Image (cartoon, rainbow, N blue to C red):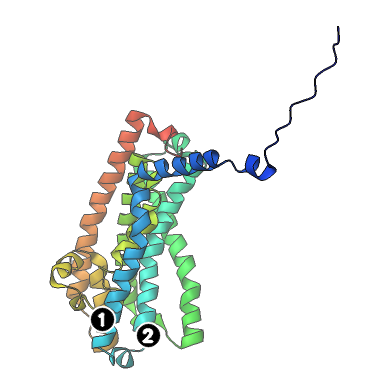
């Protein structure tokens, strides 16, 4: 009896066809389509950024068209707005990224079975937010003086007040986004970037609130950063300190921060109860 092994059958299909079968490609595309349509944050991300850019630059263009001499009257308004907006952005991202680090390293569950209390965890994240913001912004302020002769510190003590108001707004956003991740999983991670930039057209960062449509102005005045940027322009253009705007920003920030803390702690408690802490990074 012949026990010699038979030679392996060879496929006569072209190599290119074997390496890129259409049904396998279609299967992977279908997987990614299901991944997107099964997560509303991913669906939102598809159309969110183009729409945001169009709205933001539309308002800026409209304002510049109607006020061509605006920047001649107040050199540095745009630079000041950019740097102050970065305080809010970095405040929010400093909180959210420190929280995400615990998720990415799958350490969140370990932290929350330790003696660390939830409020202590929040305090630590807030502290990291301040440190990340200060160390991130300070070099930019020095470069603005060096390259453009613009000194944001000329705002004096009001700069400290603006910083406090904006970083408090950033904390509220960071707590909101972190709570959404606890509730909906890492599919909501992109909201850390999407929500903060979505507020920019409403916060009148680069133009006054008055340039917005009337019904949008009501929304804008409900956001603390709008009062900060209006106050900054009042100092740089009219040379007036608007304490009324500052007090409104602080009052709204206190309310939003309290609500955001409640939201984060409620989502954390829910994640503990349902056992999501160990799966939130998946």
Residue 54 vertical position relative to residue 104 in the rendered view, above or below: below
Residue placed furthest toward the top: 1
The front one of 126 and 18 is: 18
Q: Residue 197: x, y in percent?
A: 34, 63
Dot placed on the residue nearer the N-terminal end, 1 or 2: 1
State the image quarter where residue 45 is shown. bottom left
Location of the N terminus (image quadrant):
top right
Q: Secondary structure at mark 2?
A: loop
Dot 1 corresponds to which residue? Answer: 62
**What residue do we see at 47% from left, 84% from top?**
145
Residue 160 vertical position relative to residue 3 in the rendered view, above or below: below
**What residue do we see at 34% from left, 41% from top?**
184
Quick one: label 2, few (<14), some, or many (20+) residues within 10 Å? some
Instruction: Indicate which label's residue lies in the foreground, 1 or 2.
Output: 1
Q: Secondary structure at mark 1?
A: helix
**What residue do we see at 27% from left, 45% from top?**
263
Dot label at residue 76: 2
Q: Residue 264: x, y in percent?
A: 31, 45
State the image quarter where residue 37 is shown. top left
State the image quarter where residue 38 is shown. top left
**What residue do we see at 47% from left, 44% from top?**
29
The front one of 173 and 235 is: 173
Spatial separation of the CA atoms under disc 1 and disc 2? 20 Å
């Amino acid at each position: 009896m012949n026990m010699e092994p038979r030679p392996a059958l060879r496929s006569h299909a072209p190599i290119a066809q074997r390496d890129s079968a259409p049904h396998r490609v279609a299967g992977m595309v279908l997987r990614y389509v299901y991944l997107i349509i099964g997560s509303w944050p991913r669906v939102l991300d598809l159309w969110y950024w183009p729409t945001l850019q169009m709205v933001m630059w539309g308002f800026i263009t409209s304002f510049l068209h109607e006020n061509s001499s605006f920047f001649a009257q107040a050199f540095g308004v745009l630079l000041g707005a950019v740097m102050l907006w970065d305080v809010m952005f970095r405040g929010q991202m400093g909180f959210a990224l420190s929280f995400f680090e615990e998720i990415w390293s799958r350490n969140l569950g370990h932290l929350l079975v330790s003696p660390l209390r939830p409020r202590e965890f929040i305090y630590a994240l807030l502290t990291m937010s301040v440190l990340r913001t200060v160390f991130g912004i300070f070099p930019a302020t020095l470069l603005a003086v060096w390259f453009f002769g613009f000194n944001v510190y000329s705002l004096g003590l009001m700069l400290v007040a603006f910083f406090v108001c904006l970083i408090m707004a950033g904390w509220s956003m960071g707590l909101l986004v972190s709570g959404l991740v606890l509730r909906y999983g890492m599919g909501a991670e992109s909201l850390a970037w999407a929500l903060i930039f979505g507020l920019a057209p409403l916060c009148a960062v680069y133009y006054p609130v008055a340039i917005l449509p009337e019904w949008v102005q009501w929304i804008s005045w409900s956001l603390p950063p709008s009062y900060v940027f209006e106050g900054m322009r009042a100092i740089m253009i009219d040379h007036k300190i608007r304490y009324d705007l500052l007090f409104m920003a602080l009052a709204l920030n206190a309310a939003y921060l309290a609500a955001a803390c409640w939201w984060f702690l409620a989502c954390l408690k829910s994640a503990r109860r349902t056992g999501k802490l160990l799966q939130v990074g998946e």
